[in-house]
Image (cartoon, rainbow, N blue to C red):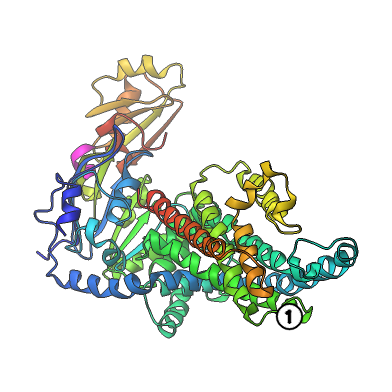
Amino acid sequence: MSGSESEAPYRDRSATDDATTDDARRAFEGGIRPRRFGAWYVAEHRFRVMWSYAQTILVTGFGEPFIYLYAMGVGLATLVDRNLSLEAGGVGYLVFVAPALLCSAALTTAVIEFSYPVLLGYKWNPTFTGMHSGPISPGQIVDGLVISVVVRLAATVAIYFGFMLLFGAVPSAAGWLAVPIATLTGMAFGTLLMAYASTIREDSGQLAMVQRLVVLPLTLFSGTFFPLSQLPWFLQWIGWISPLWHGTELTRVVTFGYAEPVWLTVLHVVVLIAMTVVGWAWARRIAVRRLAA
Amino acid sequence: MPQPVIVARDLVKKYGEFAAVDGLSFEVAPGESFGLLGPNGAGKSTTMRMIGAVSTRTAGGLSILGLDPDRHGPDIRSQLGVVPQADNLDTELRVRENLLVYGRYFGLPRRVVAERADELLEFAQLSDRGQAKVDALSGGMKRRLTIARGLINDPRIILLDEPTTGLDPQARHILWDRLFRLKEQGKTLVLTTHYMDEAEQLCDRLVVVDHGRIMAEGSPAQLIREYSSREVLELRFGSDRNEEVARALEGSGDRIEVLPDRILVYTADGEAELERISAAGLHPITSLVRRSSLEDVFLRLTGRSLIE
């Protein structure tokens, strides 16, 4: 404990830390489970909230993949396949575009779960303050949010992947790896957004701006609907910093054996994990600053 | 004397150069109902946040249940019931669900939480509202739900920050009744308020706080005895005449206090004082004799009114 003491050398602790009383013993006991499982309790809370709008989640969860795969993969594909022999690895447009749709869906879901719920929890309906009044630490609140979104993402992505199988968009046997990859893609962008959303104290439409100026360009220019190489060179950097590009390319490798150098595949994984970790850690720091000031 | 559950020594909280709390020292005994009385911005809520182990102190000593909140925040908070100034119930969940998710934060088994949730809904007189949406509740009901939520872990200490601010008189009385029951059960209550009637109703002992410092300490009756007279005579001569009449009134009672709209004369016997003043040829538009309250104590101590 000497570490924490050196942080605040002039605090008087002479008579204030008497851990031998019954009260103190009871407090230690009361602290055990929250310290250990606090993040899971937060996730439990989030699941209950999600359950309260389960209908919406289910309708979008099943409706979206069907609509998108049908429109892009079947409708648009007839046009594309007739006119182009793509640089898309020699597969049909449906197979080419499906991984991008999958990763975009993960990204969109992550954007929803990491933006307004965060603003809500800190400010509009400060449930985070409520959790922190209990034995939950700011870091655990962030962790719990992350756990709940991972689960929601994995479920959304798994349903999407099921539709991809139905549409015949997954030729490769290793295709199922698309589920964890797309989930990771959502988290890579989502945790960064969560950190940014945590810094918003006065809402003046920042999240709507993020939606228009970040999410939309990413969705269009991340090698999603057409390969990145089709973009002029001065726009290609968007792909390199885009978790969606890294995620989509990686998914393509596993769903249809998209040919790319091994180092690039490794880079995709590294970038996605790094973004997730940075966003997560940053959000935890901000949580401490905002809740325990 | 049992060991105090809260000990604060020269407690300081600074935001930059500004000292929101500037050297508070007090102790709270188990089962005691302790109040922090003061105007808005006096440092009451900041003090509450430090006692609640969610805000670190800048200097001084603080011990809650024998533990230092810097090091044992979660342990201490597992034993507290917190009723914040602004309700932070989850409006996306229903009434009973709010208790269920909150109980889980303390690591209580689901079965225990469910049982307690039903008991507490009854205590909060919300049994028939369990499935209602939070936003459908009135202000008073939301407060009672917040109190119920704060009790889900069977806390040793209950912290109430401005528990009845913004409620109508009827809702306040219902709430006071509930809080009084907790007091009867032997719970330790710590509350902040800027309502003197609330402090008089609920507090065994209180400190009057202004500008982050303690101005006085004692039971409501002690404070009134020490810093005020038994009765107060309130006189209104019309706002333009108050100053002028006040000069003529000098020497009346123990002390007089001139407010923008009225003059207060502190005296042991208000009626007698009023007669003397009338006999001297001063005839107020309205007059009122009342007992001294904590409001008068505060006015005496700070020269300012509690609610401005």
**A45 in magenta:** no
What is the count of numbered marks?
1
**B226 in magenta:** yes
Magenta region? B223-228
Q: Which quarter of the figure has residue A268? A: bottom right
Q: Which residue is mark 1?
A: A165
Can the viewer see residue B132?
no
Instruction: Name the residue located 37 percent from the left edge and 20 percent from the top edge.
Output: B282
Is the stretch drawn in magenta largely helix, strand or loop? helix
Q: Vertical placement of B203 versus B120: above or below?
A: above
Q: Residues within 10 Å of mark 1 (few under 14, many from 20)?
A: some
Q: Position of residue A207 (x, y in %)?
A: 62, 48
Instruction: Name the residue located 52 percent from the left edge and 70 percent from the top edge.
Output: A148
Can the viewer see residue A143?
yes
Q: Position of residue B266 (x, y in %)?
A: 27, 32
Q: Using the image as rendered, state which of residue A60 and residue A124 is in the foreground.
A: A60
Instruction: Name the residue located 69 percent from the left edge and 76 percent from the top edge.
Output: A161
Q: Amino acid at mark 1?
A: Leu
